[in-house]
Amino acid sequence: MRYAASVIHHAEVLILAAAVALRVNYLITWNTRHFHKVSDRKFAPFPVVTPVEFLVVFCRALLKE
């Protein structure tokens, strides 16, 4: 959690820590600007996307099946 606090806005620390602990595939948020540093780091090996961006990825995956 300390590392999370050092790389993102203080209001988002718990969200990032939970996402890392749960090993999510995506972090979906309307507020991607607070997480822009995170997706470039090994600490959070998942993309941080808006709901619309996630729906695009999800629909493309469905169409491939």
Image (cartoon, rainbow, N blue to C red):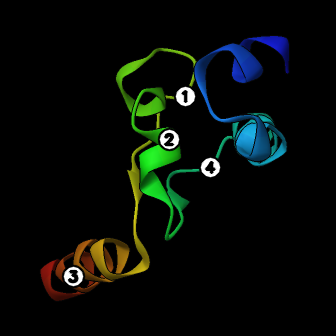
Callout 4 amino acid? Val
| Residue contact at pointers 2 and 1, CB within 8 angstroms | yes
Percent x, y of residue 51: 43, 78
Which residue matches tag 3? 65
Callout 2 amino acid? Phe
| Mark 3 vs mark 4, CA separation in Å | 22 Å
* Relative vertical location of residue 36 with respect to residue 27 in this rendering, above or below: above
Percent x, y of residue 54: 36, 72
Q: Nearer the viewer, mark 2 or mark 1?
A: 2
Q: Residue at x 67, y 40 (%)?
A: 23
Callout 1 amino acid? Ala
Q: Is residue 24 left or right of residue 37?
A: right
Quadrant containing the C terminus is bottom left
| Mark 1 vs mark 3, CA separation in Å | 28 Å
Q: Residues within 10 Å of mark 2 (few under 14, many from 20)?
A: many
Which residue matches tag 2? 35
* Relative vertical location of residue 29 with respect to residue 20 in this rendering, above or below: below
Q: Nearer the viewer, mark 3 or mark 4?
A: 4
Sequence-wise, the earlier of marks 2 and 4 is 4
Percent x, y of residue 63: 16, 87
Which residue matches tag 1? 44
Quadrant containing the N terminus is top right
Sequence-wise, the earlier of marks 1 and 4 is 4
| Mark 2 vs mark 1, CA separation in Å | 10 Å
| Mark 3 vs mark 2, CA separation in Å | 31 Å
Q: Nearer the viewer, mark 1 or mark 3?
A: 1
Callout 3 amino acid? Glu
